[in-house]
Image (tube, rainbow, N blue to C red):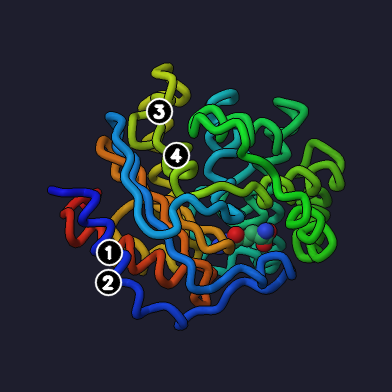
Amino acid sequence: MDMQATLEEIVKAVAPLKGQGTVASYIPSLGGVPPEKFGICVAMADGPVYGAGDWHEPFSIQSISKVFSLALVMARDYDSIWKRVFREPSGTPFNSLVQLEADKGIPRNPFINAGAIVVTDRLLTLTGDAAGSIRGLLRQEAGNPTIDIDATVAASEARHGHRNAAMAHLLASFGNLENPVDDVLANYFDQCALAMCCEDLALSARFLARQGVSTGGSPFLSPNQSKRVNAVMLTCGTYDAAGEFAYRVGLPGKSGVGGGIVAIVPGRCSIAVWGPELDANGNSVVGTAALDEFTTRTGWSVF
Ligand code: DON
């Protein structure tokens, strides 16, 4: 298969879908992103990297950061985080408060906002700098020391983050935070505001296609932990659309409201796509379609 040609064909095939979704506008700095952008990158487990479209343009990774915070906590703590977070699909929007109250402060999974806030809290306890340690991992895996937090996006997240603040306080009221609410939220907003391009993102997540082996060749996660992170991505990575995503794409994936999605073909490659227009669940319309095209054309899926 000619991977480069395949990616270029996918860019053309999904172009007619532009205009069907809505760019996230809950903060002004995301609302201003050009909606027609689209990039795709494939990082092969054994080294080669391919890309097409706007694959070198940085975007806000938002909730995709939740994969890396979970991996960092599991690498240090093995599985003790699962006493504080379930690992079931939520079937509710990523920022729902109702379920957290009903479940007595134990979030359904680590990829909805409430669960991610608990994971960030644990990472803050373990490292003293949760967002900084995620940035360190991304820089190391992507080999790009310029990856950083977009300060404007981070400030905007904090200013408009009432729902996340409510969630963090509710978690604290149930005794499910170890650190002061404001410190946890500051780290959570910073991690959401990390910016990187499709190439950086595909390389950063590639350890999940390599049974946990990092870019440098050392084990970051064990094969068992890597399997588990992929499993939670498959079942919970795209929120209340996880079933639809599994049906269409057939891969573990994690989306963000910046329009990025990272997907993993275990043993083969990691894929990053970016298209800012979102569907009603907060997942990139063009990005999901591109991943659908990718797995259909290559036959690479976990099923
Ligand atoms: O905390 C929030 O709601 C946003 N900063 C991130 C949400 C997000 O990316 C959900 N993904 N689809």
The amino acid marked with disc number 2 is Ala
Q: Which residue is mark 2?
A: 13
Q: Residue at x 75, y 43 (%)?
A: 187
Q: Of helix, strand and loop, which one carries label 3?
A: loop
Disc tally is 4
Can you say whether 148 is above or below 92 in the image?
A: above
Can you tell which mark lies on residue 205?
4
Q: Of helix, strand and loop, which one carries label 1?
A: helix
The image shows residue 161 at horizontal and vertical percentages of 79, 62
Can you say whether 234 is above or below 176 in the image?
A: below
Whole-angstrom CA distance, mark 4 to mark 2, is: 25 Å
Determine the quadrant in which ligand 1 lies.
bottom right
Whole-angstrom CA distance, mark 1 to mark 3, is: 28 Å
The amino acid marked with disc number 3 is Gly
Q: Is residue 86 visible?
A: no
Is label 4 or label 1 in front?
A: 1
The amino acid marked with disc number 1 is Ile
Asked whether, in this view, residue 19 is left or right of residue 104, the answer is: left
Q: Quick one: label 3 or label 4, which is nearer the N terminus?
A: 4
Q: Quick one: label 1 or label 3, which is nearer the N terminus?
A: 1
Q: Which residue is mark 1?
A: 10
